Amino acid sequence: MKNELDSKTLLKVYEYIQQHGEEHEEGKYCQGLTAFSDFDGYNIYLKGNGVLLRFGFHNTYHLDYEHDKLKDAFLAKVAELATLAAK
């Protein structure tokens, strides 16, 4: 997989959701994405549009999804929230 996402972008989106999201059973929910971390905060997760992104060790990430269409919709949502976080 190519490096489609920048680590700074992922961290900005995660923080934006933590600040502006509503409490949800898994974490904070904002505009279609849920953000949460494991118990020690070592790995963070973004979930939505049928995709789970795990971001952690050495700024690496892994996307779990069944169809490219789901991944594309997820990445578009991440880009949208990154734009909001930059304002």
Image (cartoon, rainbow, N blue to C red):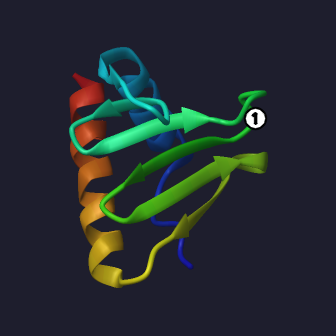
Question: Dot 1: what SS?
Answer: loop
Seen at 53% across and 66% down, the residue is 63
Looking at the image, which is closer to me, 7 or 70?
A: 70
Residue located at (21% from left, 30% from top):
84
Q: What amino acid is found at the position of numbered circle 1 in the picture?
A: Tyr
Does 84 appear above or below 70? above
Q: Position of residue 26 (x, y in %)?
A: 49, 36
Q: Identify the residue under disc 1.
A: 42
Q: Which quadrant of the rendered structure holds the N terminus?
A: bottom right
Q: Residue 48, image x and y in percent?
A: 35, 54
Task: Please identify the residue farthest to the bottom as the structure is shown.
Answer: 67
Q: Residue at x 39, y 35 (%)?
A: 13
Q: From what the image shows, is residue 75 above or below residue 7? A: below
Look at the picture and state if 32 lies above or below 2: above
35 displayed left or right of 19? right
- Extreme residue in the top direction: 19
Residue 87 vs residue 14: left or right? left
Q: Nearer the viewer, residue 22 or 45?
A: 22
Tell me the quarter of the image containing the C terminus. top left
Residue 66's image quarter?
A: bottom left
Q: From this viewpoint, which residue is outermost toward the front?
A: 25
Left or right: where does residue 20 sit relative to residue 58? left
Badge 1: residue crowd in 10 Å (few <14, some 14–19, many ≥20): few
Residue ID at (31%, 21%): 22
Q: How many marks?
A: 1
- Where does the image place residue 19, in percent across and percent down from the top left? 38, 15
